[in-house]
Amino acid sequence: MSQSSKQSLKEMIKKLSQINAGAGMEQPMVRAVIEEISPYVDEVFVDARGSVYAKKTGAAPGHTLMLAAHMDQIGMIVKNILPNGYILFEKNGDVPNNLLLGRKVFIGNKNIPGVVGCKPGHLQTPEEASKVPIPEQCYIDAGFASRQEAEAQGIGIGDQVIWQSDFMEFANPDRVCSKALDNRVNCAILIEFMRTLEKEAFKGTIYAVFTVLEEVGLYGAMMGAYRLEPDYAVALDTIPAGDTPDVMAELLLPIYLGRGPAMSLADGVMSSIYYHVVHPAVRRMIETQAAAASINLQKCTITGGRYATDASKLSYAGKGVPCAVLAVPRRYSHSPIEVMDMNDAMGSLAILQGIARDNAEQDLSFLQDGGLLSR
């Protein structure tokens, strides 16, 4: 892929990562996605809960493929405003407690600035200094002297609270850092994919679906799969990298930045609604396209933690959907400083382009020897 294509993708990631859109409050991302993708597809529509569907039809009949990337990001939500103007909050998604204190935040649709306050170090007891407070013990200082002042600025109970975090390029320009790379990187990949996908180059129908409410239950993907009834699907997400000094990668998670996109073969929590095992047919597609494009494909399983993707709901919608996860590695997941490598993202894009070109010929049978097709 060309350097200009990589730069185009990076600019889109930068733009989307700076949009504040928590779970259930994805309206700013909905508007941005519609604006960016509309010129390159045949149809765009939004469902009742906010997921965006972008449809492109190929030169001849073929399979219907659903590519899903979630738009929402982790954050907080305003729980109450105290008489003295301080703002209380709860989590909206899996925000680590130890990343709350001392953070700059934006509040509500108007992005009112504030900070998560912290007791001065000079006044902390040794016990306080060594403990991580829970959200119920935290507060936001937005510079207001009263509840009335906060409400006059449009802040109310239920408003989203999102970390402030600028997009940053490292000395190696392929390494970038921002909040919400989970999952704005794959929203950007989907836009770039549909922009560069020529209708004459594939058969069948491809839906790029930008889902809502992934961070709080994977609900948008489930609704999308029931609506479209695709022949198969790929969930596009990020995946934690295990290549930092505080993680034993080979023991816990052998995923590395800059070594290519990853495919999770099994993830979620066993005996729960959040569990996915890759479908063998879609696994073969991804492996075949990675090999054809000389892309290193990292593979892993994560069944003992809290990692789950839209695939956990896509796979079991309706009569069942053959599905796989294709993920971009990122360090420091669910933090304001997520770090990724652009080459991994470009690898995912190339694999998707190959799958699209071969869409009509894909064998979707569960039996790996090409046995009886499902009905």
Image: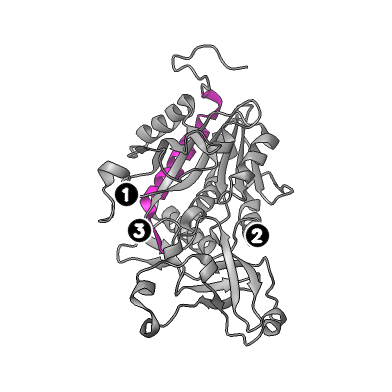
- Marks 3 and 2, how far apart at CA: 31 Å
Element under disc 2: loop
Element under disc 1: loop
Q: Is residue 221 above or below residue 182?
A: above
Say if mark 3 contacts mark 2, CB within 8 Å.
no
> Which comes sooner in the sequence, label 1 or label 3?
3
Give the labeled residue for mark 2.
Answer: 25
- Marks 1 and 3, how far apart at CA: 19 Å
Q: Is residue 32 left or right of residue 183?
A: right
State the residue in front, 219 or 361.
219
Outermost residue to the right:
48
Q: Nearer the viewer, mark 1 or mark 3?
A: 1
Quarter placement of the C terminus: top right
In the image, what residue type sits under mark 2?
Answer: Met
Q: Quadrant of residue 97?
A: bottom left
State the residue in front, 124 or 310.
124
Q: Is residue 125 left or right of residue 225?
A: left
- x then y, percent, for residue 15: 52, 63
Q: Is residue 149 above or below residue 48?
A: below
Q: What residue is shown at x 33% (from left), y 37% (from top)? A: 294
Give the labeled residue for mark 1.
Answer: 242
Element under disc 3: loop
Q: What residue is shown at x 68% (from left), y 69% (from top)? A: 157
- x then y, percent, for residue 166: 46, 70
Q: Is residue 224 above or below residue 375?
A: below
Question: What is the span of residues highlighted in magenta in the rendered image?
Answer: 336-362
Q: Which mark is residue 72?
A: none
Crowd tier of the residue under label 2, counting other residues whose Cα lies within 10 Å: few below 14, some 14–19, many 20 or above? many
Q: Is residue 357 magenta?
A: yes
